[in-house]
Image: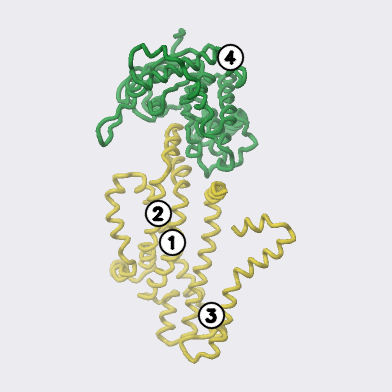
Chain colours: A yellow, B green
């Protein structure tokens, strides 16, 4: 929406418009940090730290060897977990979505498994898989796969009947039907599922490391907390937030590329 | 029928849908043949099973009994010799593909070289006047242009029979007239055999070399009418010909009779009121 607004603006308004956009984007965060700084100078609560202290702790804690020891392994497990979820969720979703009998048989079972909070699976996974990377990835997948799977099933199921009939009447091959009809048709729903999976995966990455680990972001944050390293603990939380933002931004870029036709079409029908 | 082997032969076609409350007979008993190069219009009252007939012809539905034969061999599934243009162009074109991508998609499984495929696509897009829109997406085009894309896709597929299911029911009158002339032109210049299903009486007479009037369900062939208008047709002059009016009246009468069901004679003599059918063309925009 903003992009459209900027594009249509006359040149002399452009500067004002950009300034306005920037102000809107960073205005509130800047204000919040300012208030926080003022407040922290007056507060005596040792569990709450000011922005300066936090920033110093952030620099000392995460810029250096800890980045390779704790951050990278966490992010690595997060990404592996996410990609596995997408791969399995979409593959299973296409199969289940295409075959009605299968869908009817599996639906109650899927609802049941989805209802189980994934963190309770961590002790089970620890027993079965040991304290390994695999176990943590399994925990991430066990939570992140559901929104992708269920959205894919719904998207595939809702593939337009006339589009399918067109594919049959022109004898379009199974392969092309999958890649050029069913997956693109379901892609808006798949993307919705992936977006939900992102936050679930991040949560499970942290929790899986808090339970049993000797490295990783979750482990570090829990360690700092137990040792009263309060500023360091907060800096870990800040880092988690940043990772979440980066994920969301990357996802946004990918989504806009993949669903360009979808957003374009929506814009046209709205006009 | 003229001599030579028919292109399409339909014999005692019957289609019954099993529904929750029992069986619904969509098609009673239809028989007809079609010669190569013919432009055949199928017209009938709404809900008479036109779309069912078309889907049986295209191999998308299995008839309950009877036979559909294409060049002497029975049609048991979608055939490479047929291409369908659906009524709902918005749901038949794939919005994630460009115009070119849509036209090219059915050709991908044909054993063609890349260059050959590109040539077919260009040629088809050129035939419908959309070469300059090849890189657009369907939703960026008007309804009439989208239906042209669907026609181009069917033409590029190089079918022996082009099957069109009320293709212009959803576009405005001017666009419809242009598209009708496009179908006539494609038929004249390329000799593509075409089955054109419509509910519009004027359209069937203007387009067809032959009009097949279907009765209400259980659907039969009410009349098989040859349209003896000159092959060079024009929206203004052809529609003003006395013969055009006669034929239109004839089809209209048959449809009125079809609506009342198979009641024998005595109703023929009823005068034809011009009102309803005139409205039939101008309604809806």
Quadrant location of the N terminus of chain A in the rendered image: bottom right
How far apart are the alpha carbons under marks 2 and 1? 10 Å
Q: Residue at x 66, y 58 (%)?
A: A6
How far apart are the alpha carbons under marks 4 and 2? 58 Å
Q: Residue at x 52, y 68 (%)?
A: A245
Q: Chain of mark 4?
A: B
Image position of A157 with respect to A247: above or below: above
Disc 2 and disc 1 in contact, CB within 8 angstroms: yes
Quick one: which residue is furthest to the top in this view?
B3
How far apart are the alpha carbons under marks 4 and 3? 88 Å
Q: How far across and how far down the image is residue A254, in percent?
A: 53, 56
Q: Nearer the viewer, mark 4 or mark 1?
A: 4
Please name whichever residue, A208 or B66, is drawn nearer the observer in this view of the structure: B66
Quick one: which residue is furthest to the left in this view?
B22
Q: Nearer the viewer, mark 4 or mark 3?
A: 4
Which residue, given by chain and number where applicable, does mark 1 sit on?
A196
Q: How far across and how far down the image is residue A180, in percent?
A: 48, 43
**Where is residue B184, by image quadrant?**
top right
Residue A58 badge = 3
For residue B37, say whether it is visible.
no
**Where is residue B258, by image quadrant?**
top left
Disc 4 and disc 2 in contact, CB within 8 angstroms: no
Q: Nearer the viewer, mark 3 or mark 2?
A: 2
Which residue, given by chain and number where applicable, does mark 4 sit on?
B241
Residue A205 badge = none
In the picture, measured across the screen, residue A5 lies left or right of residue A113, that is: right
């Amino acid at each position: 929406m903003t992009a459209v607004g900027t594009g249509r603006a006359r040149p002399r308004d452009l500067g004002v418009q950009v300034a306005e956009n920037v102000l809107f984007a960073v205005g509130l965060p800047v204000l919040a940090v300012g208030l926080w700084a003022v407040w922290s100078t007056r507060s005596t609560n040792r569990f709450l730290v000011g922005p300066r202290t936090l920033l110093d702790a952030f620099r000392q804690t995460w810029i250096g060897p800890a980045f390779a020891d704790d951050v990278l392994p966490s992010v690595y497990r997060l990404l592996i977990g996410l990609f596995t979820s997408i791969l399995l969720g979409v593959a299973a979703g296409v199969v289940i979505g295409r075959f009605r009998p299968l869908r009817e048989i599996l639906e109650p079972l899927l609802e049941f498994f989805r209802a189980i909070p994934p963190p309770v699976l961590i002790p089970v996974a620890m027993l079965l898989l040991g304290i390994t990377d695999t176990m943590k990835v399994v925990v991430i997948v066990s939570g992140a796969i559901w929104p992708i799977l269920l959205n894919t099933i719904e998207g595939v199921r809702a593939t337009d009947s006339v589009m399918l009939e067109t594919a049959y009447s022109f004898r379009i091959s199974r392969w092309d039907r999958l890649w050029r009809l069913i997956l693109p048709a379901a892609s808006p729903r798949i993307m919705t599922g992936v977006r939900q999976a992102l936050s679930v995966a991040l949560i499970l990455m942290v929790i899986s490391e808090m339970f049993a680990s000797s490295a990783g972001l979750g482990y570090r944050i829990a360690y700092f907390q137990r040792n009263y390293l309060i500023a360091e603990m907060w800096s870990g939380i800040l880092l988690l937030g940043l990772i979440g933002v980066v994920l969301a931004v990357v996802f946004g870029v990918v989504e806009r590329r993949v669903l360009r036709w979808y957003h374009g079409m929506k814009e046209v029908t709205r006009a | 029928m003229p001599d030579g082997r028919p292109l399409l032969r339909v014999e005692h076609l019957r289609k019954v849908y099993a529904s929750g409350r029992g069986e619904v007979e969509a098609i009673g008993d239809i028989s007809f043949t079609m010669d190569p190069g013919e432009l055949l219009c199928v017209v009938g009252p709404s809900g008479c099973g036109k779309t069912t007939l078309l889907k049986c012809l295209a191999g998308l539905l299995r008839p309950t009994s009877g036979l559909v034969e294409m060049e002497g061999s029975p049609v048991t599934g979608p055939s490479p010799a047929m291409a369908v243009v659906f009524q709902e162009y918005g749901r038949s074109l794939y919005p994630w593909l460009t115009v070119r991508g849509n036209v090219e998609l059915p050709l991908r499984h044909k054993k063609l070289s890349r260059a050959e495929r590109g040539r077919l696509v260009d040629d088809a897009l050129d035939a419908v006047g959309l070469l300059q829109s090849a890189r657009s997406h369907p939703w960026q085009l008007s309804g009439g242009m989208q239906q042209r894309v669907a026609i181009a896709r069917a033409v590029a597929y190089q079918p022996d029979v082009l099957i069109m299911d009320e293709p212009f029911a959803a576009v405005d009158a001017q666009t419809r007239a242009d598209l009708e002339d496009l179908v006539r032109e494609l038929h004249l210049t390329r000799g593509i055999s075409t089955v054109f299903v419509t509910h519009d009486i004027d359209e069937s007479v203007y387009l067809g070399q032959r009009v097949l009037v279907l009765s209400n369900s259980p659907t039969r062939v009410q009349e098989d009418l040859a349209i003896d208008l000159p092959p060079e047709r024009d929206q203004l002059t052809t529609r003003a010909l006395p013969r055009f009016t006669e034929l239109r009246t004839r089809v209209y009468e048959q449809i009125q009779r079809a609506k009342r069901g198979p009641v024998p004679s005595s109703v023929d003599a009823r005068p034809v009121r011009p009102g309803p059918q005139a409205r039939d063309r101008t309604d809806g925009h």
